[in-house]
Amino acid sequence: MSTRISFEARAWTPAEPHVVYALLADGRTWPTWSPIGSFRLEREGRDGGESEGAVRQFKTGAVTSREELLALEADETLVYSALSGLPLRDHRAEVTLAERDAGTAITWHESFGTTVPGTGWMLRRFLHRFVQRCADGLAKHAAVVG
C-alpha cells in the first residue's frame, strides 16, 4: 500500500471567479495558459460536453493523461481524477475559487498514491511544480481576458 501524498498550489488574480472558472472548465483553453500541449474531449459528461463524468485528454510532450471530471460547481469548484498517464493511484484534484481582495484566490489541491514504490517524493516534486505553473498561468490569463 502506498503512502498518500498531497500538496496545494495557490495563486491570485484580479479577475472575477466566473472568468477563472470559465477557463478552468473549458479544456480547450488549458494549452493557452498551462504547460499542457494539447486537449481532446474523449467522452462527454452526463449533461453533454465537459460536464460531470466527462473524460478529458491532455498531452504534454510524450505523456497523455486522461482525467475524469467528478464534480463541477459553477464559479467555485472543479474536481477531477487522473485515470491514466502517470504512475498514480486514487488521484483526486480539487480546484477551488474564492472571492478575495477584489479578485479570485485559486487553490489547487492534489492528493494521490503511487503505483511504483519509492517514487512518491519525485512525483510530488514534479507535480507540485507542474500544478503551480497551471495555477499561475490560469491566474495570469484570467487577468488578461477578464
Image (tube, rainbow, N blue to C red):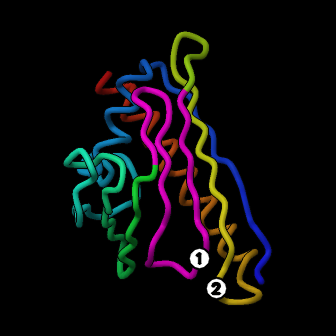
Residue at position x 42%, y 26% in the image: 75
How many numbered callouts?
2
State the separation of the CA atoms marked 1 and 2.
6 Å
- Asked which secondary structure carries label 2, the reply is loop
Residue at horizontal 65 percent and vertical 74 percent from the top: 123
Residue 6 lies in the magenta stretch: no
Q: In the rendered image of this protein, does residue 65 appear above or below residue 98?
A: below
What secondary structure is marked by label 1? strand
Q: Which residue is mark 2?
A: 115
Residue 48 as seen in the image, left or right of residue 102: left
Query: In the picture, which quadrant includes the C terminus?
Result: top left
Amino acid type for the residue under numbered disc 1? Leu
| Span of residues in magenta | 71-97
Q: Residue 65: x, y in percent?
A: 40, 72
Secondary structure, magenta segment, majority class: strand
Q: Residues within 10 Å of mark 1 (few under 14, many from 20)?
A: many
Nearest the viewer among 103 and 55 is 55
Seen at 39% across and 78% down, the residue is 63
Quadrant into which the N terminus falls: bottom right
Mark 2 and mark 1 in contact (Cβ < 8 Å)?
Answer: yes
Q: In this rendering, would 8 be left or right of 95?
A: right
Label 1 belongs to which residue? 88
- The mark found on residue 48 in the picture is none
The three-letter code of the residue at mark 2 reads Thr
